[in-house]
Structures are given as structure tokens and as C-alpha cells.
Image (cartoon, rainbow, N blue to C red):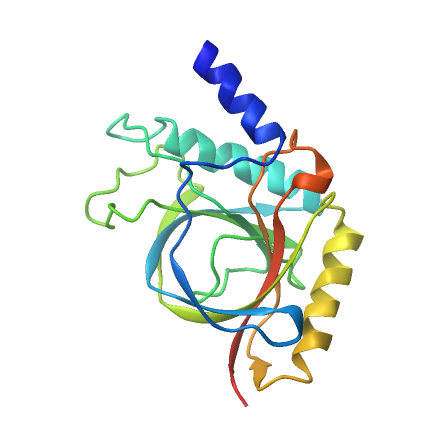
């Protein structure tokens, strides 16, 4: 109980010590952005239809959290990682990391990255058929970090800012922006780590 209370308290103030996130190398930092190179990884993802951004993230989070907390054929628990990603569209781009974005079809795709020690062959099969495991190839991403609440209007404004900042750099976007969330909803808003990102290539 004491350890659980400590973890809750740490997460409330944005302390994520010990929580794994995908490794990356910063290639450049133009115009207050980071250009990151990510390696290949594996994600658990689910698609949520007919809901707004916040509801989709919550529903998707619950589905995948169920999987990593033991709702799988092996009844195995898998360490949680950050960020959680959300994207809108029929499918999430295979080059997109864990995050959230939206497409014209009205569906949201929510992803968790799996810890690095797992492979597609060793990960347990989800009990829920709405949760699938997908390989994510390496990619180069332009990233803009921000704090605060995760309102849909805020995410849209930050994604527009990301694309605007890229215009004066040596990098151009080659996909749709998505959002990454590193902290639980109870974290103090100004201490949250949020990011918007988009795949890029050199101009």
C-alpha cells in the first residue's frame, strides 16, 4: 500500500522514474523542436470509433491497460511504458509511435509501446480481440513538447504550431501529426509532459 501511495504521489507531480520509454537519438533541435530518430519497436493498439478525443483515449487506454495487466492468454503482466499515443484514422501509420491522432473516418487508434525485451513471438496474445500487436519500424520524428491539459483544441493548436515551426527548418513532414501523453490524468497539469509529433525527412 505504501509503495502504491508513493507511486501515485510521484505521478501526480510528473515523476516518471523507472517507467520505460522508447529509446531515441536527437539528430537536431531547430526552431525549439527536437528531431528524433527512433528504432524499431512493438506496440499494442486498439481502435475506438464514434467518440470524442478524450473519451477515445480513455477507452483505448482501458483496453490496452487490461492487456498489460494480465488480460492475455498467459495471464502475464507487462510493464507499462510511456508515452501513450493516439491517432485518428482507419489505421495508425506504421511509422507512428505510441500516441493519438484523428482521421476523416471518425476512428481513433490508441497505442502503447511494449518494453524493449519483448518480441512479437514472446508477447502473450490479448484476450480482447480489439487489442492487436503490431511492429513499428524505426522513423525520424519532429517533436514539440508542452505541458497543460489535453483539450482537443489544445492538441490541434500545438500540431498546427509544430507544422508551422517545421516550415523554416531543413525537415519536412511526411505524415499526419499525432499526440503523445506521458502522465496519468491526475498529474498536475503544468507538470505534465505532452508532445505532438510528425514523421519527417530532410528537405
Q: Nearer the viewer, residue 19 or 102?
A: 19
Q: Residue furthest left?
A: 121
| Residue at the spot 39% in from the left edge and 43% down from the top edge | 20
The answer to which of 39 and 55 lies nearer the viewer is 39
Residue at 74% x, 43% y: name it: 149
Look at the picture and state if 5 lies above or below 187. above
Q: Is residue 74 left or right of residue 156?
A: left
Q: Is residue 26 left or right of residue 109?
A: left
Q: Is residue 96 left or right of residue 76?
A: right
Quadrant of res 142: bottom right
> What percent of the width, then of the height, locates residue 32?
65, 69
In this view, 93 is above or below 45: below
Work out which residue is located at the far bottom of the displayed protein and give it.
Answer: 203
Residue at x-position 70% and y-position 64%: 159
Residue 141 in the image, given as x and y percentages of width and height? 51, 69
Residue 187, above or below 115: above
Q: Position of residue 49 (x, y in %)?
A: 62, 47
- In the displayed structure image, the side of residue 202 where residue 133 appears, left or right: left
Say which quarter of the image contains residue 94.
bottom left
Question: Can you say whether 148 is above or below 5 in the image?
Answer: below
Q: Within the image, what quadrant is residue 139 found in? A: bottom left
Residue 166 location (% of width, % of height): 65, 78
If the image is split into quadrants, where does the C terminus sit? bottom right
The residue at 53%/37% (across/down) is: 61
Q: How many marks?
A: 0
Of residues 43 and 163, the one drawn nearer to the viewer in this rendering: 163
Amino acid at each position: 500500500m505504501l509503495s502504491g501511495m508513493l507511486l501515485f504521489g510521484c505521478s501526480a507531480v510528473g515523476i516518471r522514474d523507472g517507467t520505460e520509454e522508447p529509446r531515441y537519438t536527437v539528430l537536431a533541435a531547430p526552431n525549439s523542436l527536437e528531431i528524433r530518430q527512433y528504432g524499431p519497436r512493438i506496440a499494442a493498439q486498439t481502435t475506438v470509433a464514434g467518440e470524442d478525443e478524450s473519451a477515445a483515449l480513455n477507452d483505448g487506454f482501458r483496453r490496452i491497460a487490461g492487456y498489460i495487466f494480465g488480460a492475455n492468454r498467459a495471464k502475464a503482466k507487462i510493464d507499462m511504458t510511456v508515452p501513450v499515443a493516439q491517432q485518428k484514422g482507419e489505421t495508425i501509420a506504421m511509422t507512428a509511435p505510441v500516441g493519438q491522432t484523428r482521421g476523416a473516418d471518425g476512428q481513433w487508434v490508441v497505442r502503447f509501446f511494449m518494453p524493449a525485451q519483448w518480441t512479437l513471438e514472446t508477447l502473450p496474445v490479448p484476450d480482447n480481440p480489439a487489442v492487436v500487436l503490431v511492429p513499428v519500424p524505426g522513423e525520424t520524428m519532429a517533436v514539440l513538447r508542452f505541458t497543460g491539459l489535453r483539450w482537443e483544441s489544445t492538441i490541434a493548436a500545438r500540431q498546427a504550431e509544430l507544422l508551422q515551426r517545421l516550415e523554416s527548418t531543413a525537415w519536412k513532414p511526411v505524415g499526419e501529426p499525432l499526440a503523445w501523453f506521458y502522465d496519468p490524468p491526475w498529474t498536475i497539469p503544468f507538470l505534465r509532459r505532452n508532445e505532438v509529433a510528425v514523421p519527417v525527412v530532410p528537405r
